[in-house]
Image (cartoon, grey):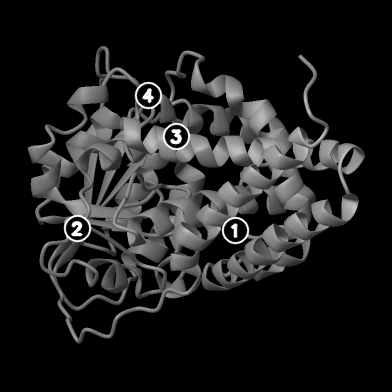
Amino acid sequence: MILSPDLPFIVFAIIAGVQIFYYSRYFSLMSFYKKNPSGFHQESPVSVIICARDEADHIEQNLPGVLVQKYKSTHQVVVVNDNSIDDTKYFLEALYRDFKQLHIVELKQEAMHIPGKKFPLSMGIKSAKYEIILLTDADCIPSSEHWIQLMQDAFTPGIEIVLGYGAFKKRNGFLNRLVRFDAFHSAIQYFSYALAGQPYMGVGRNLAYKKELFYKQKGFASHHHLAGGDDDLFINASTTSTNTAVVLDKEAFTLSTPPDNWREWIRQKRRHNSTGRYYKFKDRVKLGIYMLSHFLFYPLLITSFFTFNWQFVIIVFSLRLIIQGIVFFKCMKKLDESDLFPYYLLWDIWMFFYYLIFISSLWKKPMKNWS
């Protein structure tokens, strides 16, 4: 059977249409999002939870930024020292002398058959005094002194989960921009789907939920055998169409230390991506269609140039590029990543190679460590 030379262009147009649908139906919700001035305000007690293993340098650099938060209501900072063999313990004890809201949980034994940080995180949550649990990592620092205030303020009636943005610190170099674009690209998806009433994940660098929800879900019992998933898999199992809120205020971001080299970043990404296979079926389908359309877009674009009228190809390509550019520009501005925008076409082309590099994460055995 001889295939029509028009077929690549037809498929290309369909794929472009799928991409345009995602940008206009979902991602535009974040790009045009404005916080609803409901007038609702609260100051509920909050427990901040941080897990640390051999994080002495990060504790010294970042934990003071959590401890000096301007928050009038009662709050505590729980740091779980998970079998550290460096000076983490001594830095924590020194900080406790000045900050009595610091609560230190010392773990001196490994949990059998529970890889990753789910056991230390569970111990931290069980030790927490208050209902609102606010999570971040030892290598993260809040972007302002109002982080706790802004994140907890999103717990309006009926809200059990609040998603924040975990950004990476800006550094010189191509790798830093690539890492930050990857975090941005993930964020526009989980924020936009949450705004559409279809939340599916959050990131542990900046995430809050009710302690009651943790117990209702029996903690991490459904995936305790996996090293990852303490953030995205837990949220995937816990969300409903109405119980999740987002916080896009720049003063509510956290800033994380970016990977120093390609090997470290690829290792982190493979570990994070390996949990996607355990998402709810509807979420896997939704994300899979977007990923497949993104992956096929440029190969079909090139093929269509050689098999069809190039003017029509340019029209379809330009339409999708313009819509994508508007959405990216507004979303990057909201997430304080505007310096990435001049390269957005480069990042878009890069995604084809990104999927090639990390597609194996979907079926490879998950890693056992969490660092």
Q: Residue 242 vs residue 359: left or right?
A: left
Residue occupying image coordinates x 28% and y 30% = 118
Which kind of residue does numbered mark 1 sit on?
Answer: Lys
Q: Residue at x 47, y 52 (%)?
A: 189
Q: Secondary structure at mark 4?
A: loop
Which residue is under mark 2? 242
Please tell me whether mark 1 or mark 3 is closer to you in this view.
1
Amino acid residing under circle 2? Thr
Judging by the rendered image, the residue that carries numbered circle 1 is 169
**Residue 218 point in image, percent of width and height:** 11, 32
C-alpha span from label 1 to label 4: 25 Å
Q: Does label 1 or label 2 sit earlier along the sequence? A: 1
Residue toward you, 325 or 123: 325
In the image, what residue occupies the spot 19% across and 78% down?
72
The residue that label 4 is drawn on is 227
Measure the alpha-carbon separation of dots 3 and 2: 38 Å
